[in-house]
Image (tube, coloured by chain):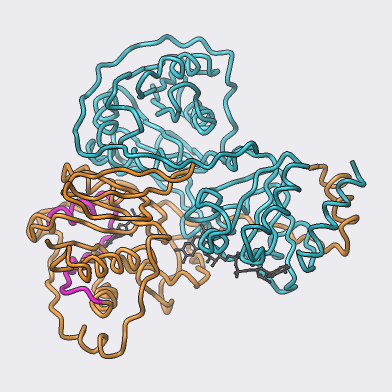
Amino acid sequence: MSVLVIAEHDNAEIRAATLNTVTAAQQLGDDIHVLVAGADCAAAANVACQISGVTKVHVADAPEYAHDLVENIAPLIQQLAGDFSHVLAPASTYGKNILPRAAALLDVQQISDITEIQSADTFVRPIYAGNAMATVQSTDAIKLITVRTTAFEAAAETGGSATLEEVAATGDTGLSQFVGQELTRSERPELTTAGIIISGGRGMQSSENFAMLERIADKLGAAVGASRAAVDAGYVPNDYQVGQTGKVVAPDLYIAVGISGAIQHLAGMKDSKVIVAINKDEEAPIFQVADFGWAADLFKAIPEFEAALDDAA
Amino acid sequence: MKVLVPVKRVIDANIKVRVKADQSGVELNNVKMAMNPFCEIAVEEAIRMKEAGSVEEIIVVAAGPEKSQETLRTGLAMGADRGVLITSDTPLEPLSVAKLLKAVVEKEGTELVLMGKQAIDGDNNQTGQMLSALLGWSLGTFVSTIECNDGGYKVVREVDGGLESVQLTKPSVITVDLRLNEPRYASLPNIMKAKKKQIDYYTPDDLGVDVTPRVHVLKVVEPPPREAGIMVQSAAELVDKLKNEAKVI
Ligand SMILES: Cc1cc2nc3c(=O)[nH]c(=O)nc-3n(C[C@H](O)[C@H](O)[C@H](O)COP(=O)(O)OP(=O)(O)OC[C@H]3O[C@@H](n4cnc5c(N)ncnc54)[C@H](O)[C@@H]3O)c2cc1C
Ligand SMILES: Nc1ncnc2c1ncn2[C@@H]1O[C@H](COP(=O)(O)O)[C@@H](O)[C@H]1O
């Protein structure tokens, strides 16, 4: 069976989520193709050829594929999909935006956010914020699937030697135009790939106080995340949000500070290997999922934690 | 201009769901139901557009069991003008819902659909994208700001890397994110008034849509529980556990 993976990239580099998606694809077949749709994306296509396990890279290089405009990319996926048993994309905002539009063009019921592949047509996916796991079987001829990247290891970035094939562009629908973007710049690791994450909630009280978490993040090489309440209050940008409707993360270590542990937040982090919770309320639900809980005022605890890290270094 | 707002009836976001013993799904009997929170945000935005004069009529539409009427009434009490209920006892998949919504869009001649980015029961995050494809309209997903202008809508999207602005050409499907607005509560007089607002009923057959499921749910189980952890009393103890026991720092 041939499987098509829709690559997420910035025209130069392939984004990490693509690598996890390739691993999921490898559980479905051994002929793994990758689509790189972009503008001046030859560099990204070449990087994709190196990914271990990839047999062919389709590159659609045209101005209409700049900025990931969904109305232009969905017809391209529709055009290619017929040759594949499965079409996979990461369950990132990129994949969630694009794949359902392609699925409807193909008259396919997409399967979102799979965490396990049981067979070519049977998959496991979380529902109700991860409070239940559904095993579902698709009867569609082609399966369109988004993949929860934390549930699959990343494929090796090198070791592959895929062939490169150019595909004809499908044209500009003119339905939307990119205006601009405000990306959060950070020297720290990305939330979805970080090995350690320290997240703050409403208990942080202000944007300035997040600096306390940032200092610890820098000591540990960690990413900084947040609860919805902290984002809504404007302490940190939207892309920090971890949860059911934000990012799903599963680092080796997740440190929740001043976060109560609402189900919607747990949905995004409860598969972390080790969870630490620091909260002044002993009854906070976050302690029910924490491996190590510390009932303390964070304004006292965080400076002490920072000092203890220095002592142990 | 008429705007269509699809609203879904789901288990209230504050309720902890329970998986049924026979693994056929989650328990819905005697469980508090509510309008999907993202749909509330879409209704609120439509009302604000109407208050600003860019929308004349707001039609809320729900597909599902008869009881979805309650969800429509909630939208009508918030300020929507009319309701459409598509009754179906077959569980509806996003593709089926999108096909039903397309039929309603065509019947009503709406030029804008505002809807939630995600229903918090199935967590599919698909229906708006699918509807936009079936209609051949522009699409803005995960939107936290909408500005009406001559060409259509300038929207700000919440993406993994931050924020992105896109100009959508009318007509459009827009799926809304949490930070677009804060939905209002319906006042008691408005709840009373909503009881008299019109709701039109259809079945999938009336709309010529085949809603046979493509995906079968084989079983639904609880996720594996996390083992209980321990409480620490000091920073030194925490660092020691992380370093020497869990070996994660
Ligand atoms: C549709 C929907 C989607 C949602 N999606 C998400 C999502 O993706 N992600 C998400 O996180 N939430 C989401 N939520 C929101 C979620 O329900 C909670 O409201 C939110 O997670 C609460 O954030 P919090 O824990 O920071 O705030 P709170 O619940 O207010 O908790 C603050 C905590 O800080 C503690 N605290 C306060 N001061 C101190 C101090 N000095 N020292 C130590 N501890 C202190 C308090 O004891 C409390 O436990 C969603 C909700 C809905 C309805
Ligand atoms: N049965 C339904 N009735 C009305 N609207 C729906 C229904 N299912 C989904 N929607 C709409 O589609 C959005 C996204 O849902 P989903 O794709 O299921 O996550 C919801 O917020 C609703 O606006």
Ligand 2 quarter of the rendering = bottom left
**Residue A39: % across, % down:** 35, 22
Viewer-proximal residue among A219 and B103: A219
Labels in figure, total: 0
Residue sitting at x 71%, y 74% = A283
Instruction: Please give the letter of the chain rendered in cyan.
Output: A
**Residue A275: % across, % down:** 72, 53
**Residue B232: % across, % down:** 85, 62
Quadrant where the N terminus of chain B lies? bottom left
Quadrant where the C terminus of chain B lies? top right
Residue A114, above or below B206: above
Residue sitting at x 20%, y 52% = B149
Q: Is residue B73 left or right of residue B161?
A: left
**Residue B116: % across, % down:** 33, 59
Q: Is residue B119 left or right of residue A290?
A: left
User: Where on the picture, by quarter, is residue B194?
Assistant: bottom left
User: Where on the picture, by quarter, is residue A160?
Assistant: top right
Q: Is residue A194 left or right of residue B104?
A: right
Instruction: Please give the letter of the chain rendered in orange.
Output: B
Please check the rendered image and state whether residue A289 is part of the magenta-colored stretch, yes or no.
no
Q: Which residues are magenta?
A: B79-103
Residue sitting at x 34%, y 42% = A110
Please check the rendered image and state whether residue B84 is part of the magenta-colored stretch, yes or no.
yes
Residue sitting at x 27%, y 52% = B174
Residue A30, above or below B201: above
Residue B111, above or below A147: below
Viewer-proximal residue among A108 and B217: A108
Viewer-proximal residue among B117 and A271: B117
